[in-house]
Amino acid sequence: MTLAEEFATLTGPLIAHGFVHAEAPDMRLLLHARGLADWDGFAASWNDLGVDTYMADGGRYRRRRYAAFSAGGDGIRRKAHQPHYQSRDYNLLNGGIARWFEPITPSIGAHPALLAILAASQGIFTACTPADARPRNWHVEVHQFRIEARSGQPGQPTPEGLHRDGVDWVLVMLVRRQNVTSGETSIHDLQRRHLGSFTLAEPLESALVDDDRVYHGVTPVTPIDASQPAYRDVLVATFRRE
């Protein structure tokens, strides 16, 4: 399959259904064409995330780092560090306040794996946006998440439940699953009717979502062997018009 055909296998369903489950080989082909390198070094950076202290449910199962970028015709540029904000219309649990997370480190913010992911996402999301609505630049927010699971304490990838993020497009890419079960992604339409479910199982496997058209959520993860570390690492990148 050519690169153009591979691209179409993602944009077609995303336009038609509002979401697409992208298999790891499909994403790998697109990312290698955009300079993907040193995946292992990139994935290892998830071992250096701070605890998310803003969890209104009192949980300490989520670790994260955060950064904002601009993506446009002249490339991808990192913005000054800023807070992450969601209104309570979109995040009833943790929304309504400016949340200052530890920044993604400079080396990871400029890493070829991250830049390839953002460039590929920009291409897909721009192609899926009607020509008269395409922005000059996208405002991109990038989150490194680790959801930890312990005996009797499941990790909650989406503690706010089935939700939208208040943006235009969302990419959720699996980085690693370690000693966990479940973590099923489900997609629902605006009437909350179920459209599809799948579990991100391999590194690079992704969900791409039209946030205007569908809700998404992920079931809790639990440890397979409670005596060993158990976690789910993902990269989330959201795109909205500047």
Image (spheres, grey):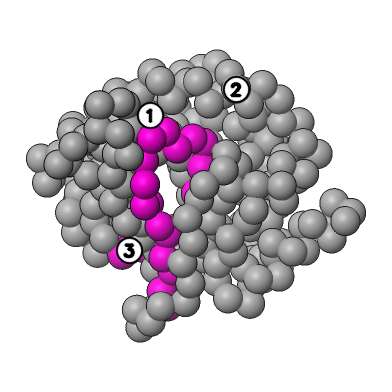
Q: Amino acid at mark 3?
A: His
Q: Nearer the viewer, residue 55 or 177?
A: 177
Residue 161 x, y percent position in the rendering = 26, 60
Crowdedness near tag 1: few (<14), some (14–19) or many (≥20) residues, C-alpha within 10 Å: many
Q: Residue at horizontal 77%, vertical 44%?
A: 29
Residue 87 quadrant: bottom left
**Disc 2: which residue:** 40
Magenta highlight range: 162-189
Query: Which type of secondary structure does the marked residue at label 2 adopt?
Result: helix
Q: Nearer the viewer, residue 156 or 180?
A: 180
Residue occupied by mark 3: 163
- N-term mark: 3 or 2: 2
Mark 3 residue element: loop
In this rendered view, identify the residue nearer to me: 64 or 157.
Answer: 157
231 vs 48: above or below:
below
Distance from disc 2 to disc 1, alpha carbons, whole Å, reads: 18 Å
Residue 5: x and y, percent? 84, 60
Of the pair 6 and 167, the residue shown nearer to us: 6
Q: Is residue 166 visible?
A: no
Q: Amino acid at mark 1?
A: Arg
Question: What mark, if any, has residue 65 been given in the picture?
Answer: 1
Upstream in the sequence, badge 3 or badge 1? 1
Quadrant of the drawing holding the N terminus: bottom right
